[in-house]
């Protein structure tokens, strides 16, 4: 289940083409959009409401949902899915667990996990999810390994980050406070393993 704010953001981004520079001739300010949206919604009832939630209906299964057979096999075959589960059970935070699994997969020092020390629990404020931020860290580490120059590094990070972001937004909110209320302990383990499989795919040598 996604929050009302999340549903609105889906409609806003879909209707306005996403983020647009303030000085763009076709820019529609969010505040103006909210006002116009409320007026239109009041006047047209369920028809417009259906349009607002159309994109949500196309969402993938949430990260914490039960695993179908195909995903169970992907997790079984993933090195990082096994690692992240073990680190999580050793009381590492979500961000630390994912970065540790990534460092292990990439053959980098485990000591680098300190970089993720402040990102667990949504930056300690139940804000941006630690699995999301640690996944971006892992992409950066992989870029440093796989890319020979700055231009290649920037392109790699931009492309993999975009894929990860889009993959995440189709499956979960980005804020820890919205995610935590969705799952129980088994659901948490399913979520971190799903994320590990996706990050492993994005940072694998074949993606460079």
Image (tube, rainbow, N blue to C red):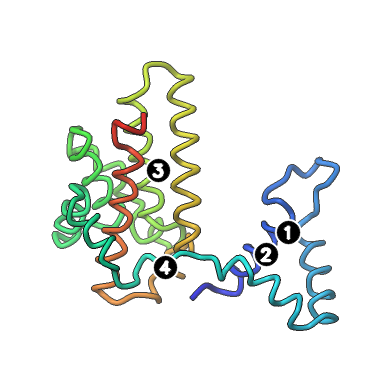
Residue picked out by circle 3? 136
4 or 2: mark nearer the eye: 4
Dot in front, 3 or 2: 2
- Of the two numbered discs 4 and 2 on the same chain, state the one appearing first in sequence: 2
**Cα separation between marks 3 and 2:** 26 Å
* Residue tagged 4: 61
Q: Residues within 10 Å of mark 1 (few under 14, many from 20)?
A: few
Q: Position of residue 77 (x, y in %)?
A: 18, 51
- Residue 175 locus on image (x, y percent): 47, 62
Q: Quadrant of residue 39?
A: bottom right
Residue matched to label 1: 15
Q: Give how far across and how far down residue 89 sits, in percent.
A: 15, 62
* Cβ atoms under marks 4 and 2 closer than 8 Å: no
Q: Which mark is residue 128?
A: none
Who's the residue at 31% across and 63% down the image?
191
Residue 71 falls in which quadrant of the image?
bottom left
Give how far apart the Cα atoms at labels 4 and 1 are.
Answer: 23 Å
> Looking at the image, do the residues carrying marks 4 and 1 touch, with CB atoms under 8 Å apart?
no
* Element type at mark 3: helix
Do labels 3 and 1 touch, CB within 8 Å? Answer: no
Left or right of residue 18: residue 68: left
Using the image, tell me which numbered label, if any, was put on residue 11: 2
Asked whether 127 or 98 is in front, the reply is: 98
Quick check: 78 left or right of 139?
Answer: left
* Residue 38 shown left or right of residue 122 in the figure: right
Q: Mark 4 packing: few (<14 Cα in 10 Å), some, or many (20+)?
A: few
Contact? badges 1 and 2 (CB < 8 Å): yes
């Amino acid at each position: 289940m996604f929050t009302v704010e999340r549903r609105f953001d889906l409609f806003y981004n879909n209707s306005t083409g996403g983020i647009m520079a303030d000085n763009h001739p076709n820019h529609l300010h969010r505040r103006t959009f909210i006002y116009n949206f409320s007026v239109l919604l009041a006047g047209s009832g369920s028809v417009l409401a259906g349009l607002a939630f159309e994109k949500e209906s196309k969402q993938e299964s949430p990260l914490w949902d039960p695993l179908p057979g195909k995903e169970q096999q992907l997790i079984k075959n993933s090195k990082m899915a096994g690692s992240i589960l073990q680190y999580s059970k050793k009381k590492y935070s979500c961000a630390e667990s994912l970065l540790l699994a990534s460092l292990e997969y990439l053959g980098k020092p485990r000591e680098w996990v300190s970089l993720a020390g402040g990102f667990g629990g949504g930056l300690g404020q139940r804000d941006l999810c630690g699995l999301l931020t640690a996944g971006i860290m892992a992409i950066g580490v992989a870029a440093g390994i796989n890319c020979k120059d700055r231009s290649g590094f920037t392109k790699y990070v931009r492309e993999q980050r975009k894929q990860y972001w889009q993959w995440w937004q189709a499956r979960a909110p980005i804020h820890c406070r919205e995610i935590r209320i969705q799952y129980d302990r088994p659901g948490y383990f399913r979520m971190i393993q799903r994320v590990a499989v996706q990050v492993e795919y994005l940072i694998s040598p074949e993606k460079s």
